[in-house]
Image (cartoon, rainbow, N blue to C red):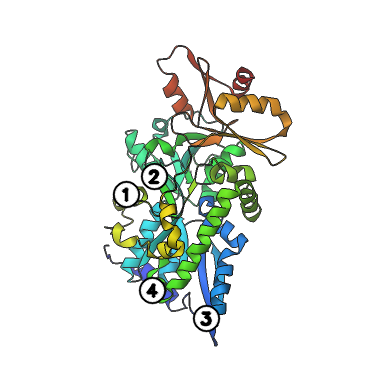
Amino acid sequence: MIRKALPAALATALTAVLATGCGGGAEAGDSRTVTVTVGYQSKTINTVTAGTLLRSLGYFEEELAKRGARDGVTYKVRWQDYATGAPITAQMTAGKIDIGSMGDFPLLINAARGEQLDRPTRLVSVTGYNLRGGLNTVMAGPGSSLRTLEDLRGKRVSTSVGSAADGTLVRALQRAGLDPEKDIRKLNQQPAVGASALQSGSADALSQFVAWPGLLAFQGKGKALYDGAGLNLPTFHGVAARNAFAEERPALVEDFLRAQVRATTYLRGKPVVAAESVARATGLPAEVVYLYNGANGVATFDPVIRPALIDALKEDVPVLKSAKLVGDVDVDAFVDDRYLRRAYGAGYQKALGYRAPMARAELWLRDGTTTSFDSPRALLAAVAKAGDTVRAAYVPDASTGTPWFADKAVWVVDGDKLLPFVTAAAAGAHTAGKPYARIVPYSTALREAA
């Protein structure tokens, strides 16, 4: 990885932080107590198996208690919640966070900053991913006249620079023939600030990661303008550990990953219960959490660092380099799955064989039951029959497979088919040149199905 000189102000600030203390060490005056500091993003809900859900289940604490009983040491966990990956990286390179979860683009910045400061980090596992890129979405206001990315020319677009959502925006604009630096006015904002800017009209569009797009759609405060899965490039979130911490206390990293594997198994087996738990912890609507984390959600939860995701990281480097956020990054050196292999033990080969099922339409009733369907038409027929007992209904986009709320999707009648799309642009592309295919309101799609 490249080592570049840091701006003087940043170097001074980091030096001051480095002098204040470090994570993963014995507490003052007590050599038999070790605290592990974990940074996570509660509202970035495809990191929950290494953050919100894991914390609520107490699995890491359980693993550490067992080890402490063997070692004669008291192990404690300090959880620190952040809105994005950037502050987690700052704290990790300052030695104050031992393990942190963040998105693919922030992970690369994490790798680069660690090398610049001679405090390297390593990617040790994955939390949630989408192999086509559907975790990121560009949103417009609900009443906006914007329909395509080309309509963003000259507009104000909010995103978090250096995030996976920013990467999606840059790539999508380039494919649409727009220059991300010249043809739009990019607003570098935290997700919550950007969401407020979209509502106030100070931003014309918003490019963000989970769960912000789904939340805005669910609340009727935004509509999808571009589905990140249109890029057909994997995007994911993962877990990084300070290399010094991992080398000094490898067993604790393995304990964390063993706990993450347990949390992943829990989420897969009890997706509704897990969504409700995350909703209580974050204040997000459970219906939004389930859109991403459900049995047929946008995210696939799988700790294994798969080759396709490593390749995606390598493709991300040029995007960050062009924005002058990193230099060269040695991705192969950054990835270290030794701890995960040991955490899985004999089960690692089985874990390697896991493949996420293809997303299906799904109905969630108020009595807590869920049912999946082979077709969007079958789902809509069930929705029409269930009436007020429906809590939420989800359908995969007919072109990308990205799950979306059925009542927020753009519906197309094409012969005897009812086809849902995340965006109006995708629906328009499908109907183009097809005289018998037409876009219809959700209410019409329901009547057609019934």
* Residue carrying label 2: 234
Structural distance between the alpha carbons of marks 1 and 4? 26 Å
Q: Nearer the viewer, residue 231 or 336?
A: 336
Identity, as a three-letter code, of the amino acid under mark 3? Asp
Q: Residue furthest bottom?
A: 29
| Residue sitting at x 46%, y 67% | 254
Instruction: Name the spot of residue 317 as percent of width and height, x first.
Output: 31, 52
Mark 1 near mark 2, Cβ–Cβ under 8 Å? yes
Structural distance between the alpha carbons of marks 3 and 2? 41 Å
Q: Is residue 7 visible?
A: no
For marks 3 and 4 on the same chain, the one whose residue lies earlier in the sequence:
3
For marks 3 and 2 on the same chain, the one whose residue lies earlier in the sequence:
3
* Residue carrying label 4: 247
Q: Residue furthest top?
A: 435
Q: Nearer the viewer, residue 338 or 9?
A: 338
Identity, as a three-letter code, of the amino acid under mark 1? Asp
Mark 1 near mark 4, Cβ–Cβ under 8 Å? no
> Please, what secondary structure does the residue beneath circle 2 have?
loop
Instruction: Name the spot of residue 315 as percent of width and height, x first.
Output: 30, 48
Q: Looking at the rendered structure, which numbered label has been put on residue 71? A: 3
Q: Residues within 10 Å of mark 1 (few under 14, many from 20)?
A: some
Identity, as a three-letter code, of the amino acid under mark 2? Pro
- Picture mark count: 4
Mark 3 near mark 2, Cβ–Cβ under 8 Å? no
Q: Which one is closest to the eye, mark 1 or mark 3?
A: 3
Mark 3 near mark 4, Cβ–Cβ under 8 Å? no
Q: Residues within 10 Å of mark 2 (few under 14, many from 20)?
A: many
In this view, 5 is above or below 170: below
> Please, what secondary structure does the residue beneath circle 1 have?
helix
